[in-house]
Amino acid sequence: MATWTWFHKLSSPPHFYRIAGKLIPWFAIPAGLLIVGGIYGGLIRAPADYQQGDAFRIVYVHAPAAWLSLMCYTTMAVAAAVGLIWRIKLAHALAAATAPIGASFALLCLATGSLWGRPMWGTWWEWDARLTSQLILFFLYLGYMALRSAFDDLQRADRASAVLAIVGVVNVPIIHFSVYWWNSLHQGSTVLRKGGPAMPPSMLIPLLMCFAGFTLLYAALACVRLRGEVLVRERNASWLQELGPF
Amino acid sequence: MNDFLHMGGYARFVWPSYALALAVLTWNVWSALRLHARARERALRRIVMDQSQAGGPASIHVPTRSGGAP
């Protein structure tokens, strides 16, 4: 009951606006430290891979970008479903705020994957299950944002784009399991696999730092974007006048 | 240092990857801050307009990109 009351209170735009403003530095500062530390560990401290040499160091930006592109889409779909079912405006705002972040990291994942694939596979691109499903994810993000911008009415944009986000989430498990379901050039999971991660700690710890840093960065960016979305959506709300210098 | 920059012969793949990552991170921070700043500016303008229409003093300072009065 207390959880539901807390959730209900948090979904109120004025309350959320204040809370999100306070949370941003708590997400952004650790995110910056973890990303810098992880990149330092990955580029300088970690040894070269016995097969891939120094090219493996691309993993420290490629894998966290891939993780974030999937996590953002799942967040977007869940938020869209919550917005559609319970008609919570803030949930639709979260989905809208998440889309550009997810799209940018899906693009980063594709670009760094291509840069990694060229020396390892001998090709920039292959119409392989993992690469193709990741490209579809990027197009789903673009479709979601294009659909939203096609409507002048925000509520209609929320509803229509929510349906696309929910339908498109089927692609997320396809991306994750594609390397097991089909023959793929792409390697299987290195961290989340049976028998534990296939990396020594000197390589693994910087990677985990980058995963955590990128995730916290998403939280900070989502808070900033959501505050902007709230200001756009609460056009006639009296609470805006009570906020003072916001 | 040269060995580090050379990246075992993979420099032309590794460094562009990190440059792209830096560009994406920078864009994300810049665009999120810009989105919020613009929404905030518009909200403040609306409040000032509402107050002036209601006959009250338009006392809230509305920042502009140039930093001067609107």
Image (spheres, helix red, strand yellow):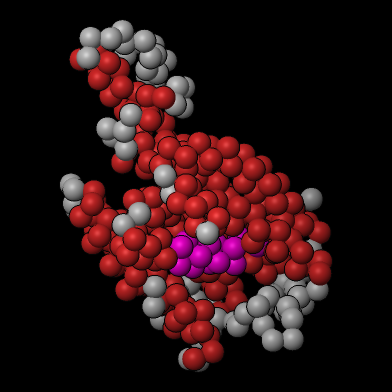
* Farthest front residue in view: A1
Instruction: Please give the name of the residue rendered at 68% of the width and 47% of the height, measured from the top-left corner.
Output: A30
Name the residue nearer the viewer: B60 or A164: B60
Q: What kind of secondary structure does the magenta stretch mostly adopt? A: helix
Q: In this view, does A34 lie above or below A207?
A: above
In the displayed structure, does residue A218 sit left or right of residue A129?
right
- Can residue A39 be seen? yes
Report which quarter residue B58 is drawn in: top left
In the image: residue A146, left or right of residue A92 = left
- x, y percent for residue A89: 34, 51
Task: Identify the residue at horizontal 70%, vertical 64% (top origin).
Answer: A207
Left or right of B59 on screen, residue A156: left
Q: Does the magenta stretch include residue A61?
A: yes
Residue A115 visible in the snapshot? no
Q: Which residue is drawn at 67% across and 69% down?
A: A56
Vertical arrangement, residue A133 with respect to residue A14, above or below: below
Q: Is residue B49 magenta?
A: no
Residue A3 relative to residue A33: left or right: left
On the image, the x and y values in percent for residue A88 come to 35, 54
Q: Which residues make up the magenta segment?
A: A60-75
| Nearer-the-camera pick, A7 or A82 | A7
Front-lying residue, A65 or A114: A65
Q: In this view, does B39 lie above or below A143?
A: above
Please tell me which residue is depicted at 64% across the width and 61% down the height of the picture.
A211
Q: Where is residue A35 in the image (x, y as percent from the top left)?
A: 67, 52
Report the label total.
Answer: 0
Q: Picture coordinates of residue A75 (x, y %)?
A: 46, 63
